[in-house]
Amino acid sequence: MSDIIAQFKALKLYGMASSYAELRQQNTPGTADSFDSVDKLLNQLLQAESTERNIRSIRYQTQAARFPVQRHLQGFDFSQSKVDQQLIHQLATMEFTTAAQNLVLVGGTGTGKTHLAIAIGTSGIQHHNKKVRFFSAIDLANSLEQEKSAGKQGRLALRLLQVDLVI
């Protein structure tokens, strides 16, 4: 029962949480079995709702990140690169964002910098509930210039303060 109430609260269904507790307290001895089967059904429904909300959130955050292409760490060929695979997987845990550290990827053309950056951002969205925003250097400069010419300096900076990782 407490699992169900906790799930109601996690999904911000506070009215259902309090009503459910009251209904359970009014339980008569003959209806205990029916409440147990209802508990199982409710538990499954709440799990389904929680999963669906998580999927929608990941889909929304991925679109909001504006990645030019989808990239994942599994798709990166570490054998063709001098990149430390263990370090990249550690970066994908997003601990550096919690510590407010920067990450700069340096290398020649075609070495996989963008692939790794997008893959790290994707990992942040899918596994760590991080908000990510991708910019090419030109797009970022153009956005800042347009803001300046419109007399609205600082708006982009304020929006970026809401983001956990800017690529």
Image (spheres, helix red, strand yellow):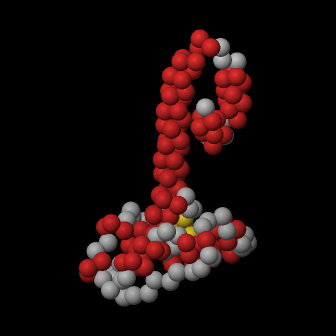
Q: Residue at x 50, y 53 (%)?
A: 58
134 vs 9: above or below: below
Task: Decide if residue 8 is in sight here.
Answer: no
31 vs 141: above or below: above
Q: Is residue 115 left or right of residue 8?
A: left
Q: Quadrant of residue 108?
A: bottom left
- List x then y, in percent, for residue 66: 49, 62
- List x then y, in percent, for residue 129: 55, 58
97 vs 30: above or below: below
Q: Is residue 136 left or right of residue 110?
A: right
Q: From this viewpoint, which residue is outermost toward the front?
A: 29
Task: Decide if residue 81 is in sight here.
Answer: yes
Q: Viewer-proximal residue, 42 or 76?
A: 42
150 vs 5: above or below: below
- List x then y, in percent, for residue 31: 59, 14
Q: Is residue 167 left or right of residue 82?
A: right
Q: Is residue 146 left or right of residue 94?
A: right
Q: Viewer-proximal residue, 81 or 61?
A: 81
Q: Residue at x 46, y 83 (%)?
A: 105
Q: Residue at x 56, y 62 (%)?
A: 130
Q: Viewer-proximal residue, 6 or 149?
A: 6
Q: From this viewpoint, which residue is outermost toward the left?
A: 79
Quarter of the rendering occupied by the N terminus: top right
Count of numbered circles in the view:
0
Q: Viewer-proximal residue, 26 or 161?
A: 26
Q: Residue at x 49, y 37 (%)?
A: 48
Q: From this viewpoint, which residue is outermost toward the top?
A: 30
Q: Quadrant of residue 100?
A: bottom right
- List x then y, in percent, for residue 37: 51, 22
